[in-house]
Image (spheres, helix red, strand yellow):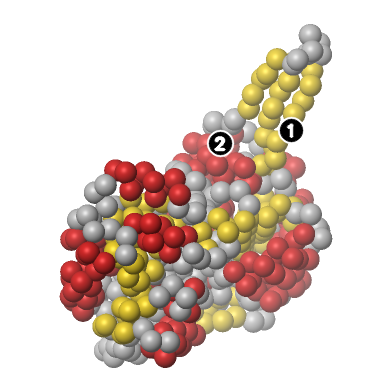
């Protein structure tokens, strides 16, 4: 059994769950301890008690801790990438990319430890100066999803520690392996006990205990809109700082003047890679009528050529769906789209492999409109739909007609339309002639509307959530 990490000690429990490979459900990757209410409370208390000393630690000491994590992730990237692909279902290539990204995130925030921001400003009053500084919050509860089991924890844990907070980390139940390895690496850096705590287990137990604790000063959550709403409701009575990332229904607009080959490649990448299990996936392809027929023909050809299979097989383009429940959700949405009049142009079939796994041929729908459920609700699988529009103006209006606002993209050779779309798209991130999925680690990440709530993640903007501002007035 892989234990919890609480107050610097590895703790076993009376209950554990199997972690199985979605490419081969006969393979048990490991057995991972589940925390109960008592263990979660102990982790919160350990984080609370360790906070004053960690907050007062030198930037150099925090730099060394985070930099060691980056070095170890880099050193062990092949091993960790294999584990990531086995437990989540990403191809090994994508697993390596995610592991390298996690290392880069820790290295970036190691550097941020040595670059604390602040301002010394003259007062409007004579002989008075004003100093603006940032201070840590306290105990930060971190709740992460299963689709990026290493990168998303890294881009929350690294800034939390960088800015002097202590951490209680609850990963998704589906992917405890990468979380445990990250805890093992942090523990091995010599980080003081209680500063970082890992509590794997059920959201109904671990998550609810965290949300009910008065000593948790802030919660950062990535997951579904429904659960994010519950996190917000539970947090408001404690007046704690809150950061929510809750998905998207991202449009990729393809105009008549687009480079056709590039547009198709970006659509396939954004919609289907990582099995479509990305909050930035382009699940709505909005195409103007002049290029519509050629785009559909070429996109269908590309989709049919995708190889679905074991995540570790070098020939695989698309790995398995992450779980049986997610596969059932994907199939349900495919049937809903067909019932509402969508034309299943290709895919949508369960694929039989050498091993039992959750394999689904990427599904492409045409002849859909923006009011269909397939275009209103996040499927979170390898399912994309095409919406035909008359012109740029209708494309822009359709792209903005959604409850979500995480990411959007446009394929065009027109500088005029590209500039206008960047300005008028109601999304937190805009891509021009790029897939909607795929973002850098050193710049802000986040959206608008139902996609996000609170300050942005990643890059220097992470300081807005993981620290608080103090203004001091000084007269000698």
Q: Is residue 315 above or below residue 456?
A: below
Residue 42 or residue 293, whichever sits in front: 293
Residue, disc 2? 113
In the figure, is residue 97 to the left or right of 219?
left
In the figure, is residue 387 to the left or right of 214?
left
The residue sitting at 75% across, 29% down in the picture is 471
Image spot of residue 306 (x, y percent): 22, 75
Question: How many residues crowd mark 1 within 10 Å: few (<14), some (14–19), many (20+)?
Answer: few
Image spot of residue 29 (x, y percent): 44, 78
* Quarter of image, res 263: bottom left
Task: Identify the mark at residue 341; answer none if there is no mark.
Answer: none
The residue sitting at 36% across, 43% down in the picture is 419
Whether residue 22 is visible here, answered yes or no, is yes
Image spot of residue 220 (x, y percent): 63, 57
For discs 2 and 1, the disc positioned in front in the rendered view: 1
Task: Identify the mark at residue 470; answer none if there is no mark.
Answer: 1
- Could you tell me which quadrant the N terminus lies in? bottom right
Where disc 1 sits, the SS reads strand
Q: Counting residues from the N terminus, which is met first, the one under dot 2 or under dot 1?
A: 2
Q: Is residue 146 above or below residue 261?
A: below
* Quarter of image, res 244: bottom right
Question: How many residues crowd mark 2 within 10 Å: few (<14), some (14–19), many (20+)?
Answer: many
Q: Is residue 282 above or below residue 427?
A: below
The residue sitting at 50% across, 74% down in the picture is 377
The residue sitting at 29% across, 74% down in the picture is 318
Whether residue 139 is visible here, answered yes or no, is no
Number of numbered markers: 2
Where disc 2 sits, the SS reads helix
Residue 106 or residue 251, whichever sits in front: 251
In the figure, is residue 241 to the left or right of 401?
right
Pointers 2 and 1 in contact (C-beta within 8 Å):
no
Image spot of residue 117 (x, y percent): 59, 30
């Amino acid at each position: 059994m892989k234990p919890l990490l609480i107050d610097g000690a590895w703790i076993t429990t009376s209950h554990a769950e199997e972690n199985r490979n979605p490419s081969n459900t006969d393979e048990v990757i490991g057995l991972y301890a589940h925390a109960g209410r008592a263990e979660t409370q102990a982790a919160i208390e350990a984080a609370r008690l360790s906070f004053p000393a960690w907050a007062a630690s030198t930037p150099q000491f925090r730099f060394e801790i985070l930099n060691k994590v980056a070095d170890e992730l880099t050193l062990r990237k092949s091993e960790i990438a294999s584990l990531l692909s086995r437990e989540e279902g990403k191809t090994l290539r994508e697993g390596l990319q995610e592991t390298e990204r996690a290392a880069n995130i820790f290295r970036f925030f190691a550097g941020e430890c040595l670059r604390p921001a602040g301002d010394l400003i003259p007062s409007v009053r004579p002989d008075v100066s004003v100093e603006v500084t940032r201070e840590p919050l306290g105990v930060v509860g971190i709740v992460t999803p299963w689709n990026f089991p290493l990168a998303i924890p890294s881009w929350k844990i690294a800034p939390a520690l960088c800015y002097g907070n202590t951490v209680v980390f609850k990963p998704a139940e589906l992917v405890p392996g990468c979380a445990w390895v990250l805890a093992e690496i942090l523990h091995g850096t010599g980080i003081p006990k209680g500063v970082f705590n890992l509590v794997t287990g059920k959201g109904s137990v671990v998550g609810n205990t965290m949300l009910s604790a008065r000593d948790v000063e802030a919660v950062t959550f990535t997951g579904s809109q429904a659960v994010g709403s519950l996190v917000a409701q539970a947090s408001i009575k404690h007046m704690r700082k809150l950061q929510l990332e809750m998905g998207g229904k991202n449009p990729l607009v393809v105009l008549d003047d687009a480079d056709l080959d590039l547009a198709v490649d970006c659509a396939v990448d954004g919609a289907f890679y990582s099995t479509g299990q990305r909050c930035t996936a382009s699940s709505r392809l909005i195409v103007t009528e002049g290029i519509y027929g050629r785009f559909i023909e070429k996109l269908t050809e590309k989709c049919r050529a995708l190889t679905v299979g074991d995540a570790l097989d070098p020939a695989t383009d698309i790995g398995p769906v992450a779980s049986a429940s997610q596969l059932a959700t994907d199939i349900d949405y495919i049937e809903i789209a067909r019932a509402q009049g969508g034309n299943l142009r290709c895919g949508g079939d369960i694929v039989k492999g050498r091993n039992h796994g959750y394999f689904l041929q990427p599904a492409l729908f045409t002849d859909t409109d923006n009011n269909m459920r397939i275009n209103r609700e996040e499927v979170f699988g390898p399912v994309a739909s095409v919406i035909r529009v008359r012109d740029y103006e209708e494309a822009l209006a359709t792209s903005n007609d959604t409850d979500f606002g995480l990411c959007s993209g446009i394929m065009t050779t027109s500088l005029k339309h590209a500039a206008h779309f960047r300005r008028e798209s109601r999304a937190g991130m805009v891509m021009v002639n790029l897939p909607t999925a795929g973002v850098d680690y050193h710049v802000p990440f986040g959206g608008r509307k139902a996609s996000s709530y609170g300050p942005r993640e990643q890059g220097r903007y992470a300081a807005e959530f993981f620290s608080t501002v103090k203004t001091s007035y000084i007269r000698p």
